[in-house]
Amino acid sequence: VENAIGTLQRSASEAAETLQRNLHCENPAVEFRTAQIILDNAIKGIELIDVIQRLERLENEHQK
């Protein structure tokens, strides 16, 4: 499982480049879906960062 996760992580840059290309592929349906995927994942990333920051604050408060 760890090897599979590593493979996926190594492919992430290529996948992001593919999404960027598809933003301007002149197929409105593909461009729309690509934009939707990018925005959905950007929002998830922001939410994850927020949760991590909250957890770190709670852990720091608990250690005091």
Image (cartoon, rainbow, N blue to C red):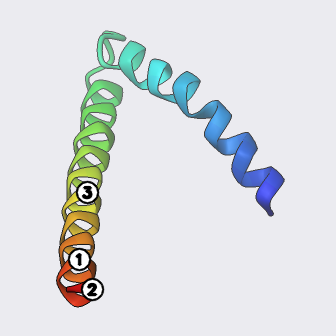
Question: Does dot 1 land on a helix, a strand or a loop?
Answer: helix
Please, what is the three-letter code of the amino acid marked with disc 3?
A: Ile
Which tag, 2 or 3, sits closer to the chain's start? 3
Question: What residue sits right under mark 3 in the picture?
Answer: 49
User: Which corner quadrant of the image does residue 10 belong to?
Assistant: top right
> How far from the left and from the top, in percent, is residue 51?
24, 69
> How far from the left and from the top, in percent, is residue 53?
21, 64
Please, what is the three-letter code of the amino acid marked with disc 2?
A: Gln
Above/below status of 59 relative to 7: below
Which tag, 3 or 1, sits closer to the chain's start? 3
> How far from the left and from the top, in percent, is residue 63?
27, 85
Above/below status of 15 relative to 44: above
Please identify the quadrant where the C terminus is shown.
bottom left
6 horizontally vs 24: left or right: right
* Residue farthest toward the front in the current orientation of the protein: 64
Please, what is the three-letter code of the amino acid marked with disc 1?
A: Asn
Above/below status of 47 relative to 12: below
Q: Say which residue appears at 47% left-offset and 18% top-offset.
A: 17
Q: Say which residue appears at 72% left-offset and 46% top-offset.
A: 6
Question: What residue sits right under mark 2 in the picture?
Answer: 63
State the CA–CA distance, disc 3 to disc 1.
16 Å
Q: Say which residue appears at 41% left-offset and 25% top-offset.
A: 19
Question: What residue sits right under mark 1 in the picture?
Answer: 60
Question: Does dot 2 land on a helix, a strand or a loop?
Answer: helix
Number of the front mark, 2 or 3: 2
Q: Say which residue appears at 25% left-offset and 57% top-offset.
A: 49
- Mark 3 closeness class: few <14, some 14–19, many ≥20 residues within 10 Å: few
What label sits on residue 40 in the rendered view?
Answer: none
> How far from the left and from the top, in percent, is residue 27?
33, 18
Question: Does dot 3 land on a helix, a strand or a loop?
Answer: helix
